[in-house]
Image (cartoon, grey):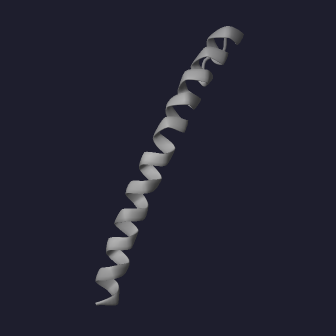
Amino acid sequence: MFRAIADVLRQIGGAIATVVTLPFRALARLFGGASSTAHGRRA
C-alpha cells in the first residue's frame, strides 16, 4: 500500500521536475549555443 503511494508520488515528482526544468534547459541550450558560437568554441 505505502509502496504504491510512494510510486505515485515519485511519478508526480518526476513529471513536475520535467515540466519545471524543461524551460530552463531550453534557455540553457539557447544561451549556451549562442555563447559557444560567439566564442567560436564547440561544446
Question: Residue visible at 61% across and 24% down?
Answer: 32
Question: Which residue lies most toward the right here?
Answer: 39
The residue positioned 61% from the left and 15% from the top of the image is: 34
On screen, residue 13 versus residue 37, left or right, reads left
Q: Give the vertical position of 16 relative to 8 (above or below).
A: above
Locate residue 11, reporting x and y percent: 35, 65
- Can residue 43 be seen? no
Q: Residue at x 49, y 47 (%)?
A: 20
Residue 32 seen in this snapshot = yes
The quadrant in which residue 29 appears is top right
Q: Position of residue 15 (x, y in %)?
A: 38, 55
Residue 10 location (% of width, % of height): 39, 69
Res 3 → quadrant: bottom left
Between 40 and 20, the one nearer to me in the picture: 20
In the rendered image, which quarter contains the C terminus?
top right
In the displayed structure, would residue 32 be above or below residue 34?
below
Residue 3's place in the image compared with 27, above or below, is: below
The N terminus, quarter of image: bottom left
Q: Nearer the viewer, residue 28 or 16?
A: 16
**Residue 28 sits in quarter:** top right
Q: Is residue 17 left or right of residue 11?
A: right
